[in-house]
Amino acid sequence: MNSPIQIPAPVSDDLSLRVAQLERQLAELSPRVPKNQVSIILLSGDFDKAMAAFMMATGAAAMGMEVSMFFTFWGCSVIKKGRKLRGKKPLHKLVNLMLPGSARDLQPSKFSFAGLGRPFFNHMMHGQMSSLEELIALAVESEIKFQVCAPSLGLMGFDADEWVVPVEVCGVAAMYEVALSARTAYFIS
């Protein structure tokens, strides 16, 4: 834990020395100040949670904030182009068959109604709010940064070309680099 910052009293009446001292103090403090960023980490592959993530992301981008979204495990399905099986190992094919192929296939976390939940929510949302696919397109237009978890790709058998958004494939260290310097970070599971 960081100790409280001690700001010593000026040691000189000389203005140039005082300015130099203040510049040194500012340089020490700068790394501790959060950036105008939002970091959203999406573990869930549920429709409603993906909607929330993209509404928060596009809203923050509209406010002029830099936004980064990190997709891991089930969350990767949200930004996939579709179900790709060709060239995959048998276990990876099985995983891809069990997961939603794309954002269009996501089901809500509650009120799934044996697969009828998503059409029900789409009907309710029509004319009231943007669809998930529209929010994803808006996020791309808003230059939101998309990161995909490299270990998830290997474990689940996803390929680097399976995404509807431009992605940076990275590990948790790159995700933390952004999240720890952001003003706000959300983890959606």
Image (cartoon, rainbow, N blue to C red):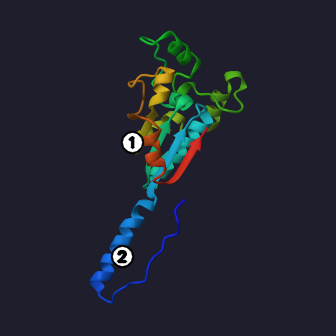
Q: Earlier in the sequence, mark 1 or mark 2?
A: 2
Q: Dot 2 lies on which element?
A: helix
Residue 168 is at least partly visible in this image = yes
Residue at label 2?
22
Vertical placement of residue 177 versus 47, above or below: below
For marks 1 and 2, give the CA distance. Answer: 40 Å
- In this rendering, would 53 be left or right of 26? right
Q: Dot 1 lies on which element?
A: helix
Vertical placement of residue 61 versus 99, above or below: below
> Which percent across, then down, holds residue 144?
42, 44
Residue 80 is at least partly visible in this image = no
Residue at the left extreme? 16
Q: Quadrant of residue 110?
A: top right
* Three-letter code, disc 2: Leu
Q: Quadrant of residue 124?
A: top right
- In this rendering, would 111 be left or right of 66? right
Residue at point 54%, 44% (across, down)? 55
Give 54 or 170, whichever is nearer the viewer.
Answer: 170
The reply to whether discs 1 and 2 touch (Cβ–Cβ < 8 Å) is: no
> Which percent across, then down, holds residue 159?
41, 22
Residue at point 51%, 9% (across, down)? 90
Residue at label 1?
141
Disc 2 residue crowd, few under 14, some 14–19, many 20+, Cα 10 Å: some
